[in-house]
């Protein structure tokens, strides 16, 4: 490739390069500023997310011709890049207060998170097997470190190790799938693979597709590949769980969408029932398992599994409407999950945070703003209007019914009834039970919660504010 | 029509929300100020809904005051509101009962007063919203918005088993709603619009199979709300545990949402399916009538008795609706209003003694008539209204339903009539046990009669009970055309001449049957 095209292609990668710069700046701040260097590193990374989000918004677009057809900086990719930045920024804001209370601040987190985001940003742009895999590992490996970042805390260390072993296993499975795809077609670019696989639904091609998708579904914690999620989410530091439970999932959904819209498009008849069953299983499993949880983080871990199930409805009902419904729900999911895991650091309990549902008992008496925000959040998680969570589910269900799958929509709708049961255990604790809970005044978790509630309410009344962007941000556009 | 420069329906829907926000700014410890503000707001809302009557054209069956704007362009959902006479009557009932409910809560609610009135006003937003929405997504949003405040009204200010009752209510109704949501989406996949008026104008009814499924999906959502046997089990719990004002609104308005849904959506959108499922629905309605009455007979708790009587009364409404006879359908809609008035008042009546004695057990009372004469009179009027004594509102509605049903199928009417007999039995027996006899329980010796405020809560309901009982014509005029419009779709045979395909311009024939109210 000519040098000039490498340079001109960089124009499209300005956000990634800038974020890499921000990560480096955070790293050096962490190392060279002797006192308060860690917090400064955090602020540097936060400024980085905001600046890069601005760059993403003005980024030029290309449909897939960059670097000999290995990257596509289309509206679809840019949209997801914003969702990662949002997740990272929310997690960082939550991290400040969390590390204050924990009494130790691992500054590494502040440059590992932006590095992870760089990986995801490249991943959602990649339309080539090799780029995909490299980008995938680029965001997977730092995320293992993030989960286990409190080395001396047994739960966090266990979470890190568990995440690492199962994560690398899934990467291996995915790589095997990729190898089979390459072996079958001799191509690495999605566009050419799609053309080569047309009409070639041999058992080997099916195996390649199943392995490839299994690796991805693993990362998104979809049933039956979900077992790691509750343990990891419970053990890892709360603000990092906010990040780990949202951004990688969003990235995986973006990758999956690129695959089923591109190379695996010809196999729609094969993967539709697969995604249908995975959606149904994931929703029911996540919601039913959540019923029994008392620990907020574990409960929200299962809830986030269930939400991946709702998103999978979009994959099963793949089409133009499903595409933007997934995109809309991803943003809503990021906001909801950040606030939901944030609940586990809303109330102080001795020298740590109350992580159980009961710790929120009686919150409404002392912190009405927090309680009202929680109410909006719970309604949104359940999918009750007028909240963004309802609109997101409604778009996904509409896509399913539009594709002639009313029963799939019904399964999703019934799941929202099941989820009401455990979400409103939190509502009951906050509003109906008596207890000493009080949210910390003007702390970052309260701030995130209130802002999230406002956003969910606004998007519930006027979903077009984000929805019209999602509609416009199509593949190759 | 606009109110203060805001389109009328938007105004009446969101005025309570604005009021709610105002209430939130009053400091929580100033409970008196919050009460006064909430009462004034609810009163103003009632006046605003009354103002609709000034410009409403009762001679038209079309939607009026229509407001239309784009809402979610990507899926074609609109901000579409409009009312006909049926919606208007229910809106008036809603705003009146909400006002009555706020007035009745003056003493009953002492804890978390600000939240209480906030939820009450939020509930009103949802209720009015349901009655004005003509876009199905908008309708669904308001339909669900109601659940949350009701959950809290029961859960925070309810009786002993309030937590159980609140979540049961929430789960049951949410279950019905989400199934209905799937039905709404299936409708969309056929019509490609959520606009009810456009669907009806499209002139392409759904294929029968699809129509039946969507009908059933809507049926589940509405039947749970009504509630019809066997979907009624949430109702006794919710009613018994809810605070008085909650029960008044629950019985007075929320149950009407179900029957309103049938009138507004099920009948005109799924005419064939509606006819097809008549045997099922009439059977369930008759069971509800008789079963609700029988269970009422054996209740020891006054509130539970009245709760079960609602099952019976709402069975009448359902029966009237699904005979598709103009007389019975009009009677059913009038009976929705009547039930709101009389059952709302009966819950208030129970609330009065509960506030004084903190018990609702019938056996705790007896001989109250001698001690509380005004109370006894109010109770008597409302008990008789509920029974359906001529001269009071209940008679007109029940009579029209039975007349219409008799002409369709006399067996149905005969079974339903037993419900009236049983209704007289449980209500009079209740009255006898509570009011007559000797005042023996020492705890009742010092009971006070109704205060002026309490009497004021009953006054509008008593006036309406007599008004509808003696001169129902204004009310029936309002619903005359809309009912005709709906029935022309679901049961054109009721209007034989018009159904004939002879396009005579300007010559709509006279209606075949003389309405009962003219006599």
Image (tube, coloured by chain):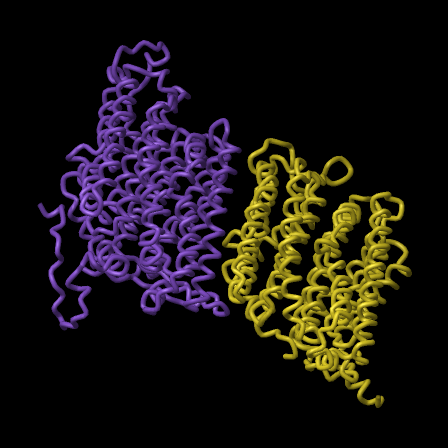
**Residue ID at (26%, 16%):** B371
Total labels drawn: 0
Residue A37 percent location from the top left of the image: 85, 57
**Residue ID at (53%, 33%):** B163
Residue B269 percent location from the top left of the image: 35, 60
Residue B397 percent location from the top left of the image: 21, 41
Query: Which chain's colour is purple?
Result: B
Q: Residue furthest left?
A: B519
In screen coordinates, is B333 left or right of B509? Answer: right
Residue A448 is at least partly visible in this image: no
Residue B418 percent location from the top left of the image: 25, 32
Q: Residue furthest front?
A: A203
Residue A245 found in image quarter: bottom right
Residue B236 is at least partly visible in this image: yes
**Residue ID at (61%, 41%):** A426
The answer to whether A197 is drawn above or below residue B459 in the figure is below
The answer to whether A247 is drawn above or below residue A432 in the figure is below
> A207 or B509: nearer the eye?
A207
> A475 or B485: nearer the eye?
B485
Q: Colour of chain A?
A: yellow
Image quadrant in which the C terminus of chain A is located: bottom right
The answer to whether B390 is drawn above or below residue B277 in the figure is above
Image quadrant in which the N terminus of chain A is located: bottom right
């Amino acid at each position: 490739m000519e040098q000039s095209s490498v340079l001109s292609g960089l124009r499209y990668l300005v956000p990634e390069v800038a974020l890499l710069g921000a990560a480096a700046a955070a790293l050096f701040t962490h190392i060279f500023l002797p006192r308060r260097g860690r917090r400064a590193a955090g602020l540097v990374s936060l400024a980085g997310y905001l600046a890069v989000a601005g760059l993403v918004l003005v980024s030029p677009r290309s449909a897939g011709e960059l670097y000999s057809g290995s990257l596509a900086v289309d509206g679809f990719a840019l949209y997801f890049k914003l969702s990662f930045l949002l997740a990272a920024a929310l997690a960082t804001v939550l991290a400040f207060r969390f590390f204050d209370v924990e009494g130790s601040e691992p500054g590494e987190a502040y440059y590992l998170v932006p590095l992870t985001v760089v990986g995801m940003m490249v991943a959602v742009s990649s339309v080539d097997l090799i780029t995909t895999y490299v980008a995938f590992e680029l965001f997977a490996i730092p995320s293992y470190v993030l989960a286990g970042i409190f080395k001396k805390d047994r739960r966090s260390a266990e979470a890190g190790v568990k995440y690492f072993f199962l994560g690398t296993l899934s990467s291996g499975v995915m790589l095997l799938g990729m190898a089979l795809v390459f072996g079958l077609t001799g191509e690495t670019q999605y566009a050419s693979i799609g053309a080569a696989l047309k009409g070639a639904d041999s058992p080997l091609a099916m195996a390649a597709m199943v392995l490839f998708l299994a690796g991805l579904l693993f990362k998104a914690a979809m049933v039956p590949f979900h077992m790691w999620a509750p343990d990891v989410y419970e053990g890892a530091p709360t603000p990092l769980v906010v990040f780990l439970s949202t951004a990688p999932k969003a990235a995986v959904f973006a990758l999956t969408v690129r695959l089923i819209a591109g190379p695996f498009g010809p196999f729609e008849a094969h993967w539709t029932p697969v995604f249908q069953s995975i959606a149904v299983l994931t929703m029911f499993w996540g919601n039913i398992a959540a019923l029994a949880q008392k620990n907020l983080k574990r409960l929200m871990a299962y809830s986030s599994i269930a939400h991946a199930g709702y998103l999978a409805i979009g994959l099963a009902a793949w089409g133009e409407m499903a595409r933007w419904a997934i995109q809309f729900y991803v943003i809503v999911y990021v906001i909801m999950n950040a606030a939901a895991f944030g609940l586990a650091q809303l109330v102080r309990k001795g020298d740590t945070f109350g992580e159980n549902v009961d710790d929120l008992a009686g919150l409404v008496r002392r912190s009405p703003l927090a309680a009202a925000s929680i109410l909006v959040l719970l309604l949104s998680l359940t999918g009750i209007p007028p909240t963004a969570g309802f609109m997101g589910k409604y778009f996904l269900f509409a896509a399913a019914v539009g594709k002639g799958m009313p029963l799939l929509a019904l399964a999703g709708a019934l799941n929202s009834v099941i989820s009401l049961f455990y979400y409103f255990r939190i509502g009951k604790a906050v509003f109906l039970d008596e207890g000493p809970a009080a949210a910390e005044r003007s702390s970052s978790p309260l701030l995130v919660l209130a802002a999230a509630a406002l956003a969910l309410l606004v998007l519930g009344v006027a979903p077009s504010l984000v929805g019209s962007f999602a509609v416009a941000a199509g593949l190759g556009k | 029509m606009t109110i203060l420069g805001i389109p009328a329906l938007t105004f009446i829907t969101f005025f309570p929300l604005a009021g709610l926000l105002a209430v939130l700014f009053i400091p929580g410890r100033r409970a008196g100020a919050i009460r006064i503000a909430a009462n004034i707001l609810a009163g103003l809302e009632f006046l605003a809904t009354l103002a609709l009557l000034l410009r409403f054209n009762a001679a038209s069956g079309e939607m009026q005051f229509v407001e239309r704007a784009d809402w979610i362009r990507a899926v074609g959902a609109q901000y579409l509101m409009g009312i006909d006479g049926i919606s208007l009557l229910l809106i008036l009932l809603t705003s009146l009962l909400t006002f009555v409910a706020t007035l009745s809560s003056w003493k009953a609610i002492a804890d978390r007063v600000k939240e209480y009135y906030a939820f009450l006003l939020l509930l009103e937003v949802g209720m009015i919203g349901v009655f004005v929405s003509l876009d199905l997504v908008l309708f669904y949003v308001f339909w669900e918005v109601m659940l949350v405040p009701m959950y809290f009204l029961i859960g925070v200010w309810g009786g002993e088993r309030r937590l159980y009752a609140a979540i049961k209510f929430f789960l049951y109704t949410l279950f019905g709603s989400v199934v209905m949501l799937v039905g709404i989406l299936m409708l969309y996949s056929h019509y490609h619009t959520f606009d009810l008026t456009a669907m009806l104008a499209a002139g392409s009814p759904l294929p029968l199979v699809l129509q039946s499924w969507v009908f059933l999906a809507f049926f589940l959502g509405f039947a749970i709300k009504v509630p019809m046997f066997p979907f009624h089990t949430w109702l006794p719990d919710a009613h018994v545990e809810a605070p008085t004002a909650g029960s008044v609104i629950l019985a007075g308005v929320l149950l009407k949402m179900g029957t309103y849904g049938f009138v507004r959506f099920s009948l005109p959108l799924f005419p064939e399916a509606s006819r097809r499922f008549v045997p099922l629905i009439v059977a369930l309605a008759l069971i509800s009538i008789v079963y609700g009455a029988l269970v009422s007979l054996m209740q020891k708790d006054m509130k539970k008795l009245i709760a079960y009587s609602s099952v019976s009364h709402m069975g009448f409404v359902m029966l009237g609706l699904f005979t598709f006879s103009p007389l019975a359908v009009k009677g059913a809609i009038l009976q929705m209003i009547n039930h709101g008035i009389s059952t709302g008042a009966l819950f208030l009546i129970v609330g009065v003694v509960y506030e004084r004695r903190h018990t609702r057990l019938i056996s705790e009372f007896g001989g109250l008539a001698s001690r509380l004469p005004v109370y006894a009179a109010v109770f008597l009027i409302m008990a008789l209204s509920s029974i359906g004594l001529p001269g009071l509102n209940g008679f007109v509605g029940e009579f029209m339903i039975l007349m219409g049903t008799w002409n369709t199928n006399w067996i149905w009417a005969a079974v339903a009539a037993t419900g009236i007999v049983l209704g007289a039995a449980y209500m009079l027996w209740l009255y006898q046990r509570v009011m007559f006899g000797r005042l023996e329980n020492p705890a009742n010796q010092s009971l006070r009669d109704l205060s002026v405020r309490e009497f004021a809560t009953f006054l509008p309901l008593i006036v309406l009970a007599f008004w509808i009982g003696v001169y129902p014509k204004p009310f029936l005029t309002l619903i005359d055309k809309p009912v005709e419009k709906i029935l022309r779709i679901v049961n054109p045979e009721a209007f034989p001449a018009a159904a004939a395909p002879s396009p005579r311009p300007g010559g709509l024939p006279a209606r075949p049957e003389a309405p009962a109210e003219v006599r």
